[in-house]
Amino acid sequence: MAKIMLVDDAAFMRMMVKNALTKAGYDNFVEAQDGAEAVRKYEEESPDMVIMDITMPNMDGLQALKTIRGSHPDAKIVMCTAMGQEGMVVDAIKSGAKDFIVKPFNAERIVQTVNTILGN
């Protein structure tokens, strides 16, 4: 089963995504609270996919995306964004993000995105 890393500074947001994916049969998760931790854990855990918030303390999601893709050009990273951050989404896609999910989350959209990216 695929290993999915969830990166968000809000624990309840990670839990919402995890719950949606658990119901769809995914059960192998790694969590990080900010971009710096995400970069470190990506190296340690080699997840199959990352779902990462854009706005976080210490290192934001865009910087983490660029750092991870710099050493792992094939990394599958999906960005999460609040409404009204379309400019950041464009940056993320240009920097190699595979897709983006808008908050508030729609559970079906999360599962559909993960299935598409992981080829399930």
Image (cartoon, rainbow, N blue to C red):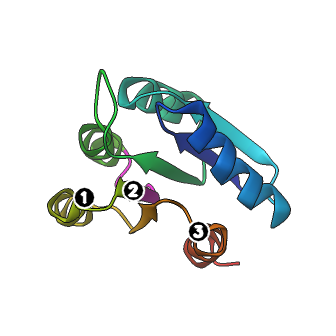
Q: In terms of sequence position, does the residue under pointer 3 or pointer 1 come before the other? A: 1
Residue 7 magenta-highlighted: no
Q: Amino acid at mark 1?
A: Ala
Q: Amino acid at mark 3?
A: Asn
User: Is residue 24 shown left or right of residue 93?
Assistant: right
Residue 56: mark: none
Helix, strand or loop at mark 2: strand
Residue at the disc numbered 2 = 79
Q: Quadrant of the N terminus?
A: bottom right
The residue depicted at 49 percent of the width and 31 percent of the height is 43
CA gap, disc 3 and disc 2:
14 Å
Return the x and y of residue 91 as percentages of the image width and height.
17, 59
User: Is residue 61 shown left or right of residue 103?
Assistant: left
Helix, strand or loop at mark 3: loop
The residue depicted at 73 percent of the width and 60 percent of the height is 20
Residue at the disc numbered 1 = 92
Is 24 located above or below residue 3 in the figure?
below
Return the x and y of residue 26 as percentages of the image width and height.
79, 58
Where does the magenta region start and end?
A: 72-78
Residue 74 magenta-highlighted: yes
Residue at the disc numbered 3 = 106
User: Is residue 97 shown left or right of residue 110?
Assistant: left
Is 57 located above or below residue 8 in the figure?
above
Q: Are marks 3 and 1 in contact (CB under 8 Å)?
A: no
Return the x and y of residue 104 as percentages of the image width and height.
49, 59
The residue depicted at 18 percent of the width and 66 percent of the height is 90
Q: In terms of sequence position, does the residue under pointer 2 or pointer 1 come before the other? A: 2
Return the x and y of residue 9 as percentages of the image width and height.
46, 30
CA gap, disc 2 and disc 1:
7 Å
Q: Are marks 2 and 1 in contact (CB under 8 Å)?
A: yes
